[in-house]
Image (cartoon, rainbow, N blue to C red):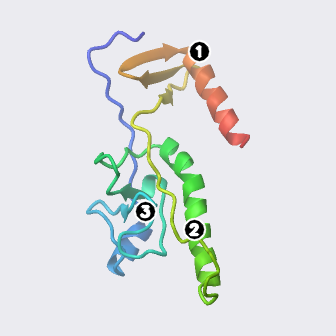
Amino acid sequence: FVDMTYCVWATGASAHVLASNLKKRGVSCTPEHWFRVTPTLQSLSHENIFAAGDCCSIEGLSDGRLAPPKAGLYAVRAGPILIQNISRLLSYYSNEASVGSGVNRSFVTYSPQEDFLKLIVCGNGEALGFRFGVPFYGKWVWKLKDYIDKKFMDL
């Protein structure tokens, strides 16, 4: 454990200039320029625009939760949902002329987890972690982060 009074996780994301440009063209964005999407990762203003990860803010989660924080974990977990939903929309459009084609236009809903393991490298072969309100620190935390990162890159 790390002896501390407070733990401040001081990392963050910023919106891409593309969001500002698309907002000017009518794509729904938050005041901070995150794309506003539904739990199916579709734009609130344009059903054929999808977004996932740090560039968007999910609205209307079924349990009333706010959009998850900006963290790579959410982008990784949303990826398969994003692919499924874009594929379903493209299949629908390509078969739209075929009456009774049976193409499924229903979309998969992304439900982000509430908490996640936070790990940050300290630059000295050690790392700091935080999960369930418990901070931890050391070389073993760096090894854990390195292991997780390598497993992710092997996907």
Q: Where's residue 74, x and y in %?
A: 48, 45
In the current view of this chain or complex, which residue is farthest to the bottom? 97
Q: Where's residue 54, x and y in %?
A: 44, 52
Q: Nearer the viewer, mark 3 or mark 2?
A: 2
User: How far is the residue under mark 1 from the one under mark 3?
Assistant: 35 Å
| Image quarter hosting the N terminus | top left
Nearest the viewer among 153 and 39 is: 39
Q: Are marks 1 and 3 in contact (CB under 8 Å)?
A: no
Pointer 1 or 3: first along the chain: 3
Which labelled disc corresponds to residue 19? none
Residue flagged by tag 3: what amino acid is it?
His
Crowding at dot 2, Cα within 10 Å, few <14 / some 14-19 / many 20+, comes out as some
Residue flagged by tag 1: what amino acid is it?
Trp
Q: Are marks 1 and 2 in contact (CB under 8 Å)?
A: no
Pointer 1 or 2: first along the chain: 2
Q: Tag 2's secondary structure?
A: helix
Horizontally, residue 108 falls left or right of residue 146, namely: left
Horizontally, residue 24 falls left or right of residue 106, namely: left
Is 64 located above or below residue 9 in the figure? below
The quadrant where residue 71 appears: top left
Residue flagged by tag 2: what amino acid is it?
Ile
Is 136 located above or below residue 19 in the figure? above
Identify the residue shown where x is 32% and y is 23%. 7
User: How far is the residue under mark 1 from the one under mark 2?
Assistant: 40 Å
Residue underneath mark 3: 16
| Image quarter hosting the C terminus | top right
Crowding at dot 1, Cα within 10 Å, few <14 / some 14-19 / many 20+, comes out as some
Residue underneath mark 1: 140
Identify the residue shown where x is 33% and y is 78%. 24
Q: Tag 3's secondary structure?
A: loop
Residue underneath mark 2: 86
